[in-house]
Image (spheres, helix red, strand yellow):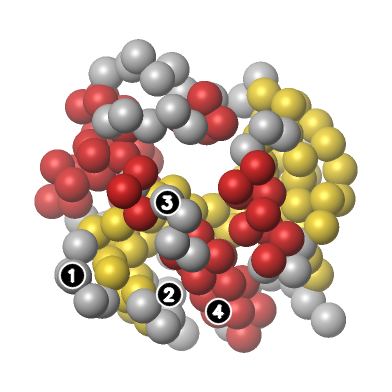
Amino acid sequence: MDYFNQESKRLTYRKLVEGDLESWKEFFIANDRLPFLGMDPNGDTNTFAKDWINNQLIRNEEHGLGHLATIEKESGNFIGLAGIVPRIVDGTEYMEIAYSLKPPYWGKGFGTEMATQLKTFGFQHKIANRFISIIHKDNADSIGVAKKNGMQILFETKYLDMDVFIFGIDKT
């Protein structure tokens, strides 16, 4: 299993490195969806990007999982992050299929491609028998991606002080 070296139709996935910080700053510029992640849209872009990348580097080392840099094959551009992320929700540990795309890449099917790749990889390599996605109740686009990935609402809860749906899919 090489979690840190995956490929789907239009994308490649690799381990994050500190050098990805500059490119990841773009995610926080003109992004009206930051509140769906529990983030203040008026916060400091540099701090957000640095904290996010550093947290992922730690997660990669501690768990052998986490967000991966996602690269569009055609352009070679770093377009976002996607990964299987350990989460605790209401006291229970889950493996979340999570992704975030830079705003210029929204609406092009990349979110669905990322989520599907991670689900397939996770089940094939027996990372978990159930995967979830934690989605803010108002995030219609991510709800659509979860449904396209075969997920359904398991329950509603609060996560990071937000009202969220926990979507999930079990290995069948």
Q: Which mark is on residue 106?
A: 3
Badge 1 crowding class, 10 Å Cα cut-off, few under 14, some 14 to 19, many 20 or more, is few
Q: Of marks 3 and 4, which one's residue comes earlier in the chain?
A: 3
Query: Which mark is in front, 1 or 4?
Result: 1
Q: Of marks 1 and 3, which one's residue comes earlier in the chain?
A: 1
Q: In 3D space, how far apart are the residues under numbered discs 1 and 4 (Cα atoms)? A: 22 Å
* Residue picked out by circle 1: 76
Answer yes or no: do the residues labelled 3 and 4 have beta carbons within 8 Å?
A: no
Q: Of marks 4 and 2, which one's residue comes earlier in the chain?
A: 2
* Residue picked out by circle 2: 3
Q: In 3D space, how far apart are the residues under numbered discs 2 and 3 (Cα atoms)? A: 24 Å
Q: In 3D space, how far apart are the residues under numbered discs 2 and 1 (Cα atoms)? A: 20 Å
Q: Is residue 104 left or right of residue 172?
A: left
Q: In 3D space, how far apart are the residues under numbered discs 3 and 4 (Cα atoms)? A: 23 Å
- Report if residue 14 is visible in the image: no
What residue lies at 86% left-to-right and 43% top-to-bottom? 155
Badge 3 crowding class, 10 Å Cα cut-off, few under 14, some 14 to 19, many 20 or more, is few
Image quadrant where residue 129 sits: bottom right
User: Viewer-proximal residue, 58 or 135?
Assistant: 135
Q: Of marks 2 and 3, which one's residue comes earlier in the chain?
A: 2
